[in-house]
Amino acid sequence: MTINKVIVELGERSYPVFIGHGAISEINTVIPKTAQRAVIVTQENIRFAVKLDIPSITVPIADGERNKNLQTIEFVSQKFAEFGLTREDVVIGLGGGMVTDVAGYAAAGWHRGTAVVHVATSLVGMVDAAIGGKTGVNTSAGKNLIGAFWQPRGVICDLDALATLPENEMRCGLGEIAKYHFLSGDDLLKLEMPERVARCVKIKAEIVSADEREGGRRALLNYGHTLGHALERSGNFSLAHGEAVAIGMIFAAHLAHVLGRIDQARVDQHYKVIGQTYGLKVKPENKIDRSELIRLMHGDKKAVTGLTFVLDGRSGIETVKDVSEQQLHRAFDAMQLVEK
Ligand code: GLY
């Protein structure tokens, strides 16, 4: 049984990510030596066992993006208090992206910073959410608008956890893997799953090491996310994150074409990779409200000066500022979506 180890290099805050079948066996190696107790933040439907060398309690949180909010942080923090969790102890986030975002943010705030270890049980968690220290919750104004950069002490990506992952969750992960396909140019589907996950982790680790707080290059990880987030919110999260990101990348390809950054062949390649290679939806099944999506995109936190997009181009994928509404309309027209 091979367990891959990738280090996220961040000086004294560097940490290992263990990837492979049975990687959970490494959990006790990433628990801080000072920790005398642990709170495991998870969800009822997560059936993946974690055996720790220290006493622990399990705190299940409600499912679904709409519960990724400050009330859940308050609930979890209350459980920390009841258990007597101190700053020397540890929080474990056991679950998908929602769980690790909540556990990470609660840990970041608890006593102004308590260690957190993530055990990612979804494909999205393994290739993206659990790595890189972004934590946070949603507000009515947008996704992940309240949060903190709080790096974990270690991350476990045990592929055994994927055995019971629902198919739509797997598709969701493939959406994020398709993103790495465009960022790196690698044909990731050629690799077996453990190596594929390890390769994605390595790509993300390198980007995070170079730009931890998203001053530049890390923003590229948001490829497909500007429309993706708007689609998720407009459908009240009925579209899963990775599926929304996949459609967002198709939109980004059309927009890049409108801006003269890529040719039609490259747009077609996006359809081929996302629709055929990764088997993901290339447009929403439901009717869309274009003006609502544009409004939501303006609310996206990456919109600093006008609308900012991450777009493909001749020099690769880059951040492009001040995209006009007229250009957005031309990209929507090219997608031929059914509108309300
Ligand atoms: N999920 C994007 C990032 O971690 O920066």
Image: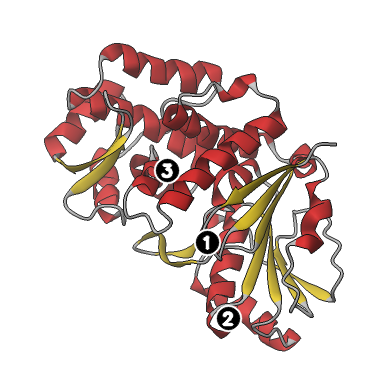
Answer left or right for 112 relative to 49: left
**Direction from residue 17 to residue 289 in the image, left or right:** left
Q: Residue furthest top?
A: 265
Would residue 20 appear left or right of 139 to someone viewing this image?
Answer: right
The tag earlier along the polypeptide, 3 or 1, is: 1
Residue shown at 73% from the left, 73% from the top: 39
Q: Say whether disc 2 or disc 3 marks the residue closer to the N-terminus.
A: 2
Which of these two is toward me, 131 or 259?
131
What amino acid does circle 1 point to?
Gly
Residue 301 occupies quadrant: bottom left
Instruction: Say which quadrant the N terminus sits in.
Output: top right
Q: Is residue 190 visible?
A: yes
Ligand 1 within 8 A of label 3's CB? yes
- Cβ of mark 2 under 8 Å from ligand 1: the answer is no
Residue 151 in picture, x, y percent from top left:
55, 63
The residue under label 3 is 221
SS label for mark 2: helix
Q: CA distance from mark 2 to mark 3?
A: 28 Å
Name the residue type under label 2.
Trp
Q: Looking at the image, is 187 positioned above or below residue 82? A: above
**Residue at image x 30%, y 23%?**
335
Q: Amino acid at mark 3?
A: Leu
Please state which of the two labelled residues, at mark 1 or mark 2, is closer to the viewer.
1
Residue 119 figure quarter: bottom right
Q: Position of residue 252 (x, y in %)?
A: 31, 31
> Residue drawn at (49%, 33%), measured in percent from left and top?
180
What residue is pinned by disc 1? 11
Q: Work out whether residue 297 or residue 19 is closer to the camera in this orientation and state it.
A: 19
Answer yes or no: do the residues labelled 3 and 1 have beta carbons within 8 Å? no
- Residue at x 76% of width, y 74% of height: 33
Circle 2 Cα neighbour tier, 10 Å, few/some/many (<14 / 14–19 / ≥20)? some
Residue 110, numbered circle: 2
